[in-house]
């Protein structure tokens, strides 16, 4: 006869062996019940925290965004690749081979920043820094205007 678990003879909670062992001495049923209870509690507490600390969370995310933007700009040289413009308010990350809209739709903002920074650090040459004017000129020259319009 096969042993129910390495450490336990039966479920710690319900004392049965007819259900499969899941973990921590619990059968699948008891484990899932315990997990469901803790998930609900944690979701409620997380929602309460977000509600009570909305301003604090916004400030932290703003700092995170600014820090990653600075890191990206430093890695890409802090100036436009085409004209040398250096005002950071108008500098933009550009996909060298186009199709940036497809990649933007796949990830949320935090994941996108993380992926871009990792790509730049690995020297994959997928991104460049352009000022807004040069970026729009490049988009026009390469005909990179997202999806085609639907005309009636």
Image (cartoon, rainbow, N blue to C red):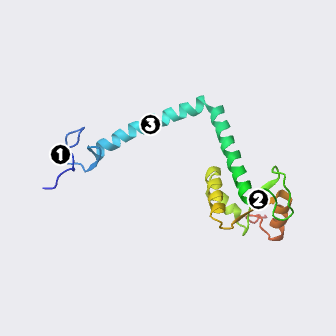
Neighbourhood count class around disc 2 (C-alpha, 10 Å): few under 14, some 14–19, many 20 upward: few
- What residue is at 67 percent from the left and 36 percent from the top? 59
Q: Is residue 41 left or right of residue 64?
A: left
Which label lies toward us, 2 or 3?
Answer: 2
Using the image as rendered, state which of residue 148 and residue 25 is in the foreground. 25
Above or below residue 54? Residue 142 is below
The tag on residue 77 is: 2
Outermost residue toward the top in this view: 52
Above or below residue 18? Residue 119 is below
| Secondary structure at numbered mark 2 | loop
- What residue is at 66 percent from the left and 44 percent from the top? 64
- What residue is at 83 percent from the left and 70 percent from the top? 141
Q: CA distance from mark 2 to mark 3?
A: 47 Å
Which label lies toward us, 1 or 2?
Answer: 2
| Secondary structure at numbered mark 3 | helix
Give the image location of residue 145, x and y in percent: 77, 64
Give the image location of residue 56, x and y in percent: 64, 33
The quadrant in which residue 134 appears is bottom right
Q: Which residue is mark 3?
A: 40
Q: Which residue is mark 1?
A: 9
Above or below residue 78? Residue 39 is above
The quadrant in which residue 137 appears is bottom right
């Amino acid at each position: 006869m096969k042993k129910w678990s390495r450490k336990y003879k039966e479920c710690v909670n319900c004392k049965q062996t007819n259900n499969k062992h899941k973990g921590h001495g619990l059968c699948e049923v008891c484990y899932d019940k315990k997990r469901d209870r803790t998930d609900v509690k944690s979701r409620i507490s997380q929602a309460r925290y977000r509600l009570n600390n909305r301003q604090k969370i916004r400030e932290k995310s703003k700092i995170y965004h600014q820090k990653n933007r600075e890191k990206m700009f430093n890695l890409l040289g802090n100036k436009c690749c085409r004209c040398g413009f250096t005002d950071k308010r108008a500098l933009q990350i550009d996909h060298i081979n186009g199709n940036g809209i497809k990649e933007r739709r796949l990830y949320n903002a935090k994941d996108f920043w993380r992926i871009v920074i990792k790509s730049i650090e690995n020297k994959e040459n997928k991104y460049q820094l352009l000022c807004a004017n040069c970026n729009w000129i490049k988009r026009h020259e390469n005909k990179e205007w997202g999806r085609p319009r639907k005309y009636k």
